[in-house]
Amino acid sequence: MATLEPARRRGLSNEVADTVRAAIFDGRYPPGSPLREVELSQALEVSRGPVREALQQLEREGLVRTGWHRGATVAELSAQDVAELDSLRGALEVLAVRLVVDGAGDLTAIERAAEAMEHARTPHEMVRLDIEFHDAVYAAAGHSRLVQAWEAIRSQVHLFLLTRVAVSTHGYLELVRSEHRALADALRDGDVEGALRLFAAHRQHAFDVLASGH
């Protein structure tokens, strides 16, 4: 029988990661902000060990970067980061849209996610709902490995959209509402080519705004 290392409890570090991730996503820690272990451990009333493990987890997600003599900071996306995320997200969404339309599955969660956007009052809230809409699309695709691929870049796409709203929020809330209403309608109508065009235009608009800030 193989010898295995004893399992370690990681519940606390996961809680710390969830808390810091939420603070990044709601704007309390914008891109470039330092994430100091001592300050976080004091604020969260935990030892530095779980904080260090949490920051390592967030680094694997692409939300945090560490540098020699610099410590951990919230990741800032370069022009190359933006281009790579946009192209990978596009490839995944093409497959997701085709599967959703071809499968003619239950679109209730997608439509509810679009409806929830009607009540968003801040850009950060809208970004969160935008991500949840796309969560619903991937879930409806019924492809577990596609969902895993999306989850691997999900946090980085969230950061991508946060960086986009940092460039400009002019007309942002209504634009995103209308775009997602149209996306949900196209999926419901079974119009795969129309849906693909709308999803591409949705990605392109965010890319163009963000690229202009670089």
Image (cartoon, grey):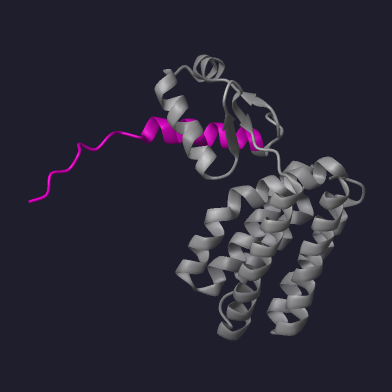
Asked if residue 91 lies in the magenta stretch, the reply is no
Residues 56 and 169: in front is 56
Instruction: Report if residue 7 is visible in the image.
Output: yes
Q: Is residue 125 left or right of residue 38?
A: right
Specify the farthest residue to the front. Answer: 68
The quadrant the C terminus occupies is top right
Q: Residue 143, image x and y in percent? A: 49, 72
Q: Residue 125, image x and y in percent? A: 72, 44
Residues 19 and 188: in front is 19
Taking the spot 76% from the left edge, 43% from the top edge, the residue there is 163
Please determine whether, in this image, residue 157 is positioned above or below residue 65: below
Number of numbered tags placed on the structure image: 0
Asked if residue 18 lies in the magenta stretch, the reply is yes
Instruction: Report if residue 191 is visible in the image.
Output: no
Please determine whether, in this image, residue 117 is positioned above or below residue 168: below
Q: Is residue 114 left or right of residue 108?
A: right
Specify the farthest residue to the left. Answer: 1
Q: Residue 62, image x and y in percent? A: 58, 44
Q: Residue 167, image x and y in percent? A: 85, 43
Please determine whether, in this image, residue 51 is positioned above or below residue 135: above
Q: Is residue 169 left or right of residue 23?
A: right
Q: Is residue 1 left or right of residue 59?
A: left
Magenta range is 1-24
Taking the spot 40% from the left edge, 23% from the top edge, the residue there is 49
Specify the farthest residue to the right. Answer: 170
Residues 120 and 176: in front is 176
Taking the spot 84% from the left edge, 63% from the top edge, the residue there is 178
Please determine whether, in this image, residue 201 is positioned above or below residue 51: below
